[in-house]
């Protein structure tokens, strides 16, 4: 890896330059042992339409943000710990080629590179960093991932009831559990998912029922584990215990 670059002057200057590009809106990025490996512009599949985003790859995090036109300035900084990342190569579509998905426990999204070679380079470096981090920390790859949001333009009707047609008056909403595009009637419920947010999030009716069922199952399992085990002694009330108090 590139551990020999950590704490060197050139690496410190590179990280400082990235911090400066984000200005006061960005978080500090310089920590001991962190190395900036590279940067590049990728197209991120957003809710409304694909948009270019600047990405910076460090040996432990992936940072990206929005590009301010014609200037080396960025905002809307996002920081993703690489040990929480899983990658999935995706097939091309008519709108986007050289695609892959970046999956994490809090957010998952699709990006695309300008060429197949560029995608291979990004995936190779990302996989190497993730593998090195997991080996170093002894952690297993993450298995819980947030669902990516399906773009608004992917459907003109609600993906749950399949009847409500979207218009300027009938808004699209996204279920935070499955990522489907749904109408207001099919997503009136909120559910607390601490992994994603400290506040209850909008979910579709189907996911709401599933989440409630999972919560009930977990509650019942917890209640069963707290009851007396088979064969244990349980004290019965004495006759005096059953007398009414005065």
Image: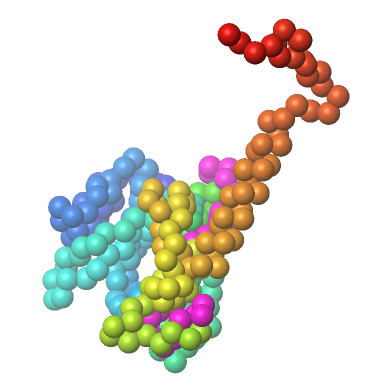
* Res 43 seen here: no
* Lateral position of residue 56 relative to residue 211, left or right: left
Circle count: 0
Indicate the quadrant containing the C terminus: top left, top right, bottom left or bottom right.
top right
User: In which quadrant of the rendered view does residue 75 lie?
Assistant: bottom left
- At 17% from the left and 71% from the top, the residue drawn is 68
| Outermost residue toward the bottom in this view | 94
* Lateral position of residue 38 relative to residue 20, left or right: right
Q: Is 129 in front, or is 185?
A: 185
The colour style of the image is: rainbow
- At 47% from the left and 52% from the top, the residue drawn is 193
- At 45% from the left and 49% from the top, the residue drawn is 194
Asked if residue 72 is positioned above or below residue 78 in the image, the reply reads below
Q: Is 39 in front, or is 61?
A: 61
Q: Is 12 in front, or is 240?
A: 240
Asked if residue 146 is positioned above or below residue 232 in the image, the reply reads below
Residue 6 % position (x, y): 35, 45
User: In which quadrant of the rendered view does residue 71 lie?
Assistant: bottom left
User: In which quadrant of the rendered view does residue 72 lie?
Assistant: bottom left
| Outermost residue toward the right in this view | 231
- At 52% from the left and 51% from the top, the residue drawn is 132
Magenta range is 136-161
Residue 168 % position (x, y): 28, 85
Q: Main secondary structure of the magenta part?
A: loop
* Res 235 seen here: yes
Residue 169 % position (x, y): 29, 83
Asked if residue 51 is positioned above or below residue 27 in the image, the reply reads below
- 180 magenta-colored: no
* Lateral position of residue 70 relative to residue 34, left or right: left
Residue 196 % position (x, y): 43, 54
């Amino acid at each position: 890896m590139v551990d020999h670059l950590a704490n060197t002057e050139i690496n410190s200057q590179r990280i400082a330059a990235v911090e400066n590009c984000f200005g006061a809106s960005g978080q500090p990025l310089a920590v001991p042992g962190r190395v900036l490996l590279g940067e590049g512009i990728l197209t991120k599949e957003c809710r409304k339409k694909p948009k270019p985003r600047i990405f910076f790859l460090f040996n432990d995090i992936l940072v990206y943000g929005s590009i301010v036109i014609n200037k080396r300035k960025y905002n809307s900084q996002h920081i993703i710990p690489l040990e929480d990342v899983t990658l999935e190569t995706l097939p091309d579509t008519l709108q986007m080629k050289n695609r892959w998905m970046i999956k994490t426990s809090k957010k998952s999204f699709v990006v695309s590179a300008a060429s197949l070679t560029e995608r291979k380079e990004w995936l190779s470096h990302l996989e190497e960093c993730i593998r090195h981090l997991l080996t170093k920390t002894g952690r297993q790859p993450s298995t819980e991932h947030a669902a990516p949001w399906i773009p608004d333009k992917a459907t003109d009707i609600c993906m749950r009831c399949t009847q409500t047609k979207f218009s300027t008056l009938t808004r699209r909403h996204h279920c935070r559990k499955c990522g489907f595009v749904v109408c207001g009637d099919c997503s009136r419920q909120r559910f607390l998912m601490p992994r994603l947010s400290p506040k209850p999030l909008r979910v579709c009716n189907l996911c709401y029922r599933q989440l409630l069922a999972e919560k009930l199952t977990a509650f019942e399992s917890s209640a069963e584990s707290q009851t007396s085990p088979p064969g244990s002694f349980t004290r019965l009330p004495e006759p005096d215990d059953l007398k009414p108090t005065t």
